[in-house]
Image (cartoon, rainbow, N blue to C red):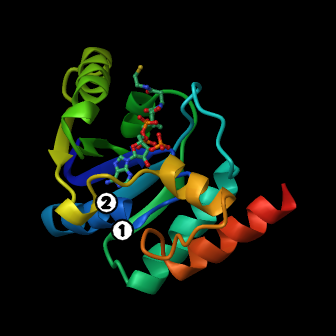
């Protein structure tokens, strides 16, 4: 098992500056970070898995994150960790309201893989209220999402919403 590879899983529908803040912090702590785009069966994402993958790839390239890569996973996160040889799960904790859900997920993942550890990182305080749903609601109602997502994601978001 590689203690230097960390996996940052999420739905990323779409990636926001808040997620990017967590990626930057994780990239400083670990030799390599994999942003793993997955499915939450409870959610109905606006973007397909491959669209979310492409947006993150673009962000990683434009930000020149040298030790960060992006990947897709289906099924259980712990199986994906095994596949890439990692035991470290990165999650962002924005506020107390995140805690219960994160606590449940971290303990379920630990039960499924006793050596997997979840590492919680705090985003910068300017991002604590931000979520992907909020960004989509603003875009759907013709608001300005430029403070929350990079320009490439903003364009992608408006063109997707216009088409659907
Ligand atoms: N900045 C901005 N938004 C943030 C954030 C940050 N730093 N940290 C969290 N969020 C938001 C996300 O935007 C998202 O908002 P939304 O609900 O409006 O879309 C929300 O917090 C949390 O979503 P996400 O990070 O996508 O996590 P999730 O709780 O939906 O989990 C998986 C997604 C893929 C990690 C999870 O479902 C999973 O592991 N699935 C595989 C099955 C499995 O193994 N489950 C665990 C064991 S049962």
Crowding at dot 1, Cα within 10 Å, few <14 / some 14-19 / many 20+, comes out as: many
Instruction: Residue 8 in the image: state x and y as whole percent.
Output: 35, 50
**Ligand 1 lies under 8 Å from the Cβ of mark 1:** no
Q: Are marks 2 and 1 in contact (CB under 8 Å)?
A: yes
Total label count?
Answer: 2
Above or below: residue 69 compared with residue 10: below
For the residue labelled by badge 2, is the local secondary structure a helix, a strand or a loop? strand
- The residue beneath circle 2 is 33
Q: Quadrant of the C terminus?
A: bottom right
Q: Residue at x 52, y 47 (%)?
A: 133
Instruction: Residue 158 in the image: state x and y as whole percent.
Output: 70, 69
Position of residue 16 in the picture relative to residue 92 (left or right) = right
The quadrant holding residue 104 is top left
Instruction: Residue 33 in the image: state x and y as whole percent.
Output: 31, 60
Ligand 1 in which quarter: top left
Q: Quadrant of the N terminus?
A: top left
Front residue of 161 and 44: 161
For the residue labelled by badge 1, is the local secondary structure a helix, a strand or a loop? strand
Above or below: residue 75 compared with residue 130: above
Position of residue 117 in the picture relative to residue 137 (left or right) = left
Q: Residue at x 35, y 78 (%)?
A: 65
Give residue 68's mark: 1
Front residue of 43 and 127: 127
Give residue 47's mark: none
Instruction: Residue 146 in the image: state x and y as whole percent.
Output: 50, 76
The answer to whether any part of residue 31 appears in the image is no
Q: Residue at x 66, y 76 (%)?
A: 155
Above or below: residue 145 compared with residue 132: below
């Amino acid at each position: 098992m590689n203690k230097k590879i960390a996996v940052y899983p999420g739905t990323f529908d779409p990636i926001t500056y808040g997620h990017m803040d967590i990626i930057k912090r994780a990239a400083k702590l670990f030799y390599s970070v994999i942003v793993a785009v997955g499915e939450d069966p409870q959610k109905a994402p606006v973007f397909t898995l491959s669209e979310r993958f492409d947006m993150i790839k673009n962000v990683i390239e434009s930000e020149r994150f040298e030790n960060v890569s992006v990947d897709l996973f289906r099924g259980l996160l712990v199986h994906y960790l095994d596949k890439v040889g990692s035991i470290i799960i990165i999650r962002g904790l924005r506020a107390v309201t995140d805690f219960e859900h994160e606590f449940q997920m971290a303990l379920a993942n630990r039960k499924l893989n006793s050596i997997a550890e979840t590492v919680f990182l705090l985003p910068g305080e300017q991002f604590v209220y931000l979520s992907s749903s909020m960004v989509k609601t603003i875009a759907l109602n013709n608001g300005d999402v430029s403070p929350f997502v990079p320009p490439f994601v903003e364009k992608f978001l408006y063109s997707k919403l216009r088409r659907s």
